[in-house]
Image: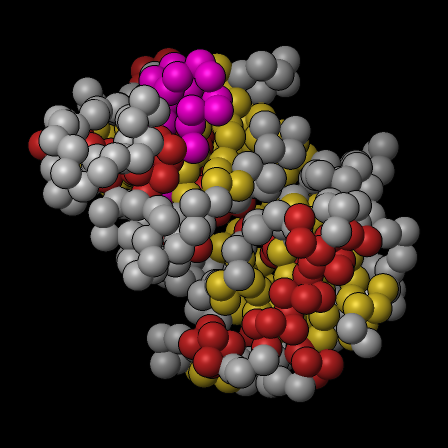
Amino acid sequence: MSRAPINALRSAAALSSRNISPFHPTRRASTLTKQNKLPASYYRGGTSRAIIFKQQDLPPDRTTWSPIFRGAIGSPDPNGRQLDGLGGGLSSLSKVCVVGPSSHAGADVDYTFAALGIKDDDVDFSSNCGNMTSAIGPFAIDSGLVQPPLGGAGEVTIRIHNTNTGKIIHSTFPVTEGEAAAYGDFAIDGVSGTAAKIELAFINPAGSKTGKLLPTGNVVDNFDGVDATCIDAGNPCVFIQAKDMGVDGTILPDDIDAHPTLLKRLDSIRRQASVAMELSKDPASTPGSIPKIAMVSPPTSHTLLSGETIQDGEVDLVIRALSVGQPHRAVPITVAMATAAAANLEGSTVWRNVERERVDADGITLGHSSGKILVGATFDEEGGLRMLLSLGRRGGLWRGLFTGNE
């Protein structure tokens, strides 16, 4: 991981952008002022990237965080490119994490996630990001929030308290020379190359925002004449069948974007489900990041974004998910978790499409636009749900891209 002072990254790094100051969140173009600086790191977690701040480096007043985050990411940008920040014009790249000492007796660190709008000024704290969760443990070690194992090497488990959902996640990974190991031979679909492996265990993720696995009390609801399963595991999610939307379940993200009516119909269903799940009072007040919505379909051979072909016998289910209104190019980790839970609910929209004889005995294998992911779900003696994630073939689970100091 490269390390460079933030003030040396003037044009490329939004951490020294003109909008980062909490005292001057907006400035006229004619205002001449120097840049403001904050220590920060930039990590990839799974198929997402985010700026990570230490909580101690941010103002105590959390109402001042949003303009700082917008300045760092480069939002809002009417052109959708976020060139004045570290965002990348995609929902999976427009994210901020804050990590600090834990306020929870059963955790080592607190982790707060924010999803930022690209063309608007929305800063949404309503959900967790499963992909970025994989970077929090390594950041905790690398930043000194948690001490490495004796001797500076070995396997560690960091207990993470996600403040957005109140849930606990255990992150297990190797440490070498006092830092989280960045390089290794583990790989996931959707990311090129390999890196060190991280195992995430989500402890009792059901009811992350609603307190219930089935927030509406039903296995199947109906919105706009379309059957939907509303479930809350990791994040609240809505699952519908691709065939009910009149599209092929193997449709790729660019084709979803180009479809004349699909995104509008999906958003209408998502907003109605939000009201039914009591996440919002009315469709207009539905948060941007939850509930997530995804289309599912039975396994079938199809072409991936890479141009490779995935065979129907390699997966148990095909899924196409949206995140903050955009088609996801893989699948959000929390959506994968909710899918695994819904697959075991007889009659659900997911259960109707999943193969009864699983490809892998350890869980359900989901086929997404970039490949596949295996998610295992187990129940403890008290009936608590535990999710374990194992991710596919290419691209390591996390990597620190740079750390900047004031």
Which residue in the rendered view is the most extreme toward the left?
8
Q: Is residue 97 left or right of residue 23?
A: right
Q: Is residue 230 left or right of residue 249?
A: right
Task: Please report the residue visible at 58 percent of the width from the left and 20 percent of the height from the top.
Answer: 107
Residue 62 seen: yes
> Closer to the camera, 240 or 284?
284
Task: Please report the residue visible at 43 percent of the width from the left and 76 percent of the height from the top.
Answer: 254
Q: Is residue 58 magenta?
A: yes
Q: Is residue 230 magenta?
A: no
Q: Where in the figure is residue 145, as x and y percent of width and height?
A: 39, 17
Up/down of 260 relative to 398, above or below: below
Task: Please report the residue visible at 71 percent of the width from the left and 66 percent of the height from the top.
Answer: 269
Task: Please report the residue visible at 57 percent of the width from the left and 51 percent of the height from the top.
Answer: 288
Q: Where in the figure is residue 194, as x and y percent of width and height?
A: 31, 53
Colour scheme of this structure image?
secondary structure
> Closer to the camera, 241 or 85?
85
> Closer to the camera, 195 or 243?
243
* Quarter of the image where the C terminus is located: top left
Residue 154 seen: no
Occupied quadrant, residue 244: bottom right
Q: Is residue 385 left or right of residue 95?
A: right
Q: Where in the figure is residue 77, as x and y percent of width and height?
A: 32, 53
Q: Where in the figure is residue 116, as x and y percent of width and height?
A: 44, 45
Residue interval drawn in magenta? 49-66
Which residue in the rendered view is the most extreme toward the right?
217
How many discs mark residues in the rendered view?
Answer: 0
* Quarter of the image where the N terminus is located: top left
